[in-house]
Amino acid sequence: MTQQSLFIVIEGLDGSGKSTASLALKKLLEKRLSREVMRTYEPKDDAVAGTFIRDILEKRITQFDPFMLALGYATNRLDHNSRFIRPWLAQEGLQVVICDRYYLSSLVYNSSEDFSFDQVMLLNRKALRPDVIFFLNVSAEVCRERMNQRDEPLELFETKLDLYRQKYIEAMEYLRTNRAENIVAIDGNQSVEKVVAAMLREIEVLLNEH
Ligand code: TMP
C-alpha cells in the first residue's frame, strides 16, 4: 500500500529559517502533487491555550508555572490535531500537512531537571506522530545574527540559543532511541532551494514506501 497521507514537521532554533523553508516546501510539494498542501505552525494561535501561550512568549504574563506552560503546549497541540491536522489528512487522496514546530520543541523548551523528556512525552502521548521531522541544522551564532536583523523584541525562549541547540541534539537522540522517530537533519546554512530539495528527496522515499 502506498502512503495515504504525509505529516511533515520542520524544527530548529528560532532564526534557523523554518518559516522560509516550510513556505518553499509547500510550494514545491503543491507543484509535485498537484494539490493544496496545508502549512501550519505551533503554538497554534487559534487553538486552545493559544492566547495564553502568546501572552507568556511576549511577556505580558510573567508569573507562571513552567509545568503549566508545558500543559498549555500539549493541550494546544491536541486541539490543533483534532480540529486542523487530522481532518485535513483524513480527506480523500494523498494529503500533506507541513507543521512548523511540534513535540520536539516541547522536549527542548519545556523539559527541565525536574520535568523529564519522558514526562513531556506522556503529556503528548495522544499527539499524531509525524512521518518525518526535519531538523534545520544551523549554528547558534547564525540564528542569533538573523534574529538581531529582525529588529523585534526577543520572545521568552529567544535567548540561550547554545543551550537549546544542545537540547535539540539530546531530544532528537531521545526520540530516535525511545520511539524510533524518523528525524532528518538538514544543513540549514545552504540556500533555501537546496534545503527544500534535500527535504523533497526524503519525502520521495516516503511516498514510494510500501
Ligand atoms: P515562534 O512562534 O516564534 O516560533 O515561537 C514559538 C516559541 O514557542 C519558540 O520560542 C519555542 C516555543 N515552544 C515551546 O516552548 N514548546 C512547544 O511545544 C512549541 C511548539 C514551541
Image (cartoon, rainbow, N blue to C red):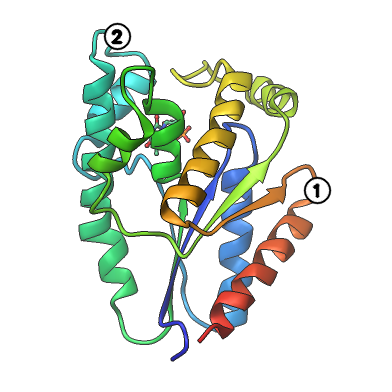
Amino acid at circle 1: Gln
Q: Is residue 28 above or below residue 65?
A: below
Disc assigned to residue 179: none
Q: Position of residue 26 (x, y in %)?
A: 56, 64
Q: Does the residue tagged 2 have its C-beta within 8 Å of any atom of ligand 1?
A: no
SS for callout 1: loop
SS for callout 2: loop
Q: CA distance from mark 2 to mark 1?
A: 37 Å
Residue reaching furthest front?
A: 177
Residue at horizontal 43%, vertical 27%?
Answer: 109
In the foreground, 105 or 209: 209
Earlier in the chain: of badge 2 and badge 1, it is: 2
Disc assigned to residue 62: 2
Please identify the quarter of the rendering in which residue 201 is found.
Answer: bottom right
Q: Is residue 38 above or below residue 20?
A: below
The quadrant where ligand 1 appears is: top left
Q: Residues within 10 Å of mark 2 (few under 14, many from 20)?
A: few
Residue reaching furthest top?
A: 63
Q: In this view of the protein, can residue 105 be seen by the observer?
A: yes
Amino acid at circle 2: Thr
In the foreground, 9 or 173: 173
Q: Residues within 10 Å of mark 1 (few under 14, many from 20)?
A: few
Query: Left of 3 or right of it: where is 128?
Result: left
> Label 1 belongs to which residue?
190
Q: In this view of the protein, can residue 151 be seen by the observer?
A: no
* Quadrant location of the N terminus in the rendered image: bottom left
Q: Is residue 61 above or below residue 177?
A: above
Q: Position of residue 104 (x, y in %)?
A: 45, 42
Residue at horizontal 74%, vertical 28%?
Answer: 142
**Residues at marks 2 and 1 touching, judged by CB atoms closer than 8 Å:** no
Query: Left of 116 or right of it: where is 198?
Result: right
